[in-house]
Image: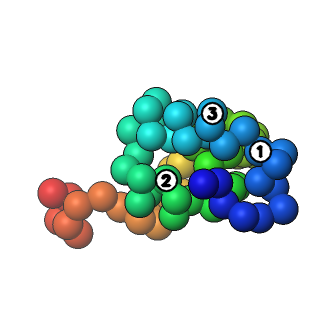
Amino acid sequence: MMPGNSHANTLPWRAMIAFGLGRLRLAPKEFWALSYPEFLALTGSISVAKAAPLSRVDLEKLLQTYPDGDPDGR
C-alpha cells in the first residue's frame, strides 16, 4: 500500500520505489527514511547551486590558514 499523504495520487510511487531500490540500491529502510527533497537530490531532479572555483589567491589564503600535516611540515 502506498503512503497515505496528499501526494499519493500524484507521485509515481512505483517508479520511485523501483529507482530507489533497484537503481540506487537502497535498502527499503533507507528508501522509506528519505524525505522527498532528499530523494529528488539523489535522482538529480533538483539543481544545486554551484560555487565558483577558488582563485589561486583564495587557495593560497586557505592553505596558509589551514595547513596540511604537522606544524613541522609533515
Q: Residue at x 46, y 30 (%)?
A: 23
Q: Which residue is mark 3?
A: 15
What residue type is disc 1 on?
Leu
- Give x and y (percent) for residue 69: 23, 61
Q: Is residue 59 left or right of residue 44?
A: left
The local crowd at label 3, few if under 14, some if 14 to 19, many if 20 or more residues have their Cα within 10 Å, is: few
**Relative depth, front residue between 46 and 51:** 46
What residue type is disc 2 on?
Phe
Query: From the image, which quarter does the C terminus lie in?
Result: bottom left
Q: Earlier in the sequence, mark 1 or mark 2?
A: 1
Disc number at residue 73? none
In the structure shown, which secondary structural element does the residue marked by tag 1 occupy? loop
In the structure shown, which secondary structural element does the residue marked by tag 2 occupy? helix
Query: Of the residues tagged 1 and 2, which is closer to the observer?
Result: 1
Disc number at residue 31? 2
The local crowd at label 1, few if under 14, some if 14 to 19, many if 20 or more residues have their Cα within 10 Å, is: few
Q: Which residue is mark 1?
A: 11
Q: Is residue 25 left or right of residue 34?
A: left
- Give x and y (percent) for residue 14: 62, 37
Real-space CA distance between mark 3 and mark 2, rounded to the nearest whole angstrom = 13 Å
- Asked if residue 54 can be seen in this view, the reply is no
What residue type is disc 3 on?
Ala
Q: Residue at x 41, y 65 (%)?
A: 66
Q: Residue at x 66, y 60 (%)?
A: 3
**Relative depth, front residue between 60 and 36:** 36
